[in-house]
Amino acid sequence: MAFQLPTTVSSHHNPVLQPNECSSTLFQTIAAPASVVWALVSDFENPQRYKPFVRSCKIIDGQANQVGCLRRVDVASGLPASYSIERLETLDHDQCIFGFSIVSGDHRLSNYRSIMSLHPNGGDETVVVETYVIDAAEANTKEETCAFVDTIVKLNLRTLSRVAEDLAGKAQQQV
Ligand code: A8S
């Protein structure tokens, strides 16, 4: 692959795994400047801006968009869960690194945490790298657990790309 992950973030994307954990790293190239993508990714209070399964979200503890705050995410019907409680773990505006963990909910995702980093890739292009780690679900293999999560994360990244490209296109038209 042409994209080389900078060494400054490589530890975030190469987690050390416990025997019961599985992990995956996904890449998405977006035809929009990192500032536009970062505005969407870093808005912990509003994941529905690019996550298609999220119906609504509210901050339930702490100050919005401050590390340590908790959000309650309600997801669309038809999924194997209805809500999730999530904690903002990392928010680095200089390096464009965002991390959150799932702390509870009525789903089977156990000990899920995700970290995303954004990388300007020449022109007005951004590469988004997302790595998650999760415990293999009790009744499922690691492969099944990761296949389920990969599907959701890939869809989120694809939607992020579409929304960011729309926003960047609109900004261009106004110049
Ligand atoms: C994210 C990542 C994930 C979200 C999962 C994996 C979830 O919101 C959905 C279905 C579930 O069964 C679990 O970045 C949960 O949001 C869409 C409700 C947590």
Image (cartoon, grey):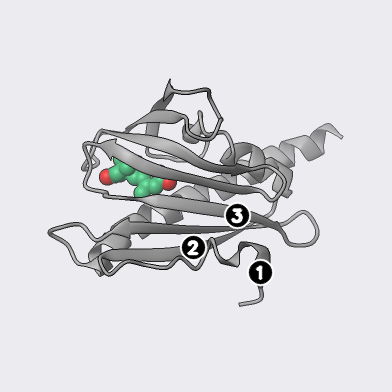
66 is higher (above) or lower (below) than 29: above
Q: Give the residue drawn at x 28%, y 37%.
A: 104
Tell me, for residue 117, which label it has, or none. 3
Q: Residue at x 51, y 30 (%)?
A: 46
Image location (x, y in percent) of residue 71? 41, 29
* Residue 33 placement (x, y as % from top left): 74, 48
Q: Secondary structure at mark 2?
A: strand
Q: How far separated are the C-alphas under marks 3 and 1? A: 12 Å
Q: Which residue is mark 1?
A: 7
Return the disc, 3 or 2, that comes first in the chain's sequence: 2
| Above or below, 10 relative to 175 | below
Q: Is 33 placed above or below 26 here?
A: above
Residue 6, position as x, y percentages in the image: 67, 67
Q: Residue at x 66, y 69 (%)?
A: 7
First-in-chain label (2 vs 1):
1
* Residue at position x 50%, y 28% in the image: 45
Q: Are dots 2 and 1 in contact, CB under 8 Å?
A: no
Mark 3 or mark 1: whose residue is earlier in sequence = 1
Disc 3 or disc 1, which is closer to the eye? 1
- Give the quarter of the image for residue 84: top left
Mark 1: few/some/many CA within 10 Å (<14, 14-19, 20+) = few
Q: Which is closer to the viewer, label 2 or label 1?
A: 1
Amino acid on which the number 2 mark rests in the picture: Leu
Q: Which mark is residue 26?
A: 2
Please indicate whether residue 114 sits to the left or right of residue 28 in the image. Answer: left
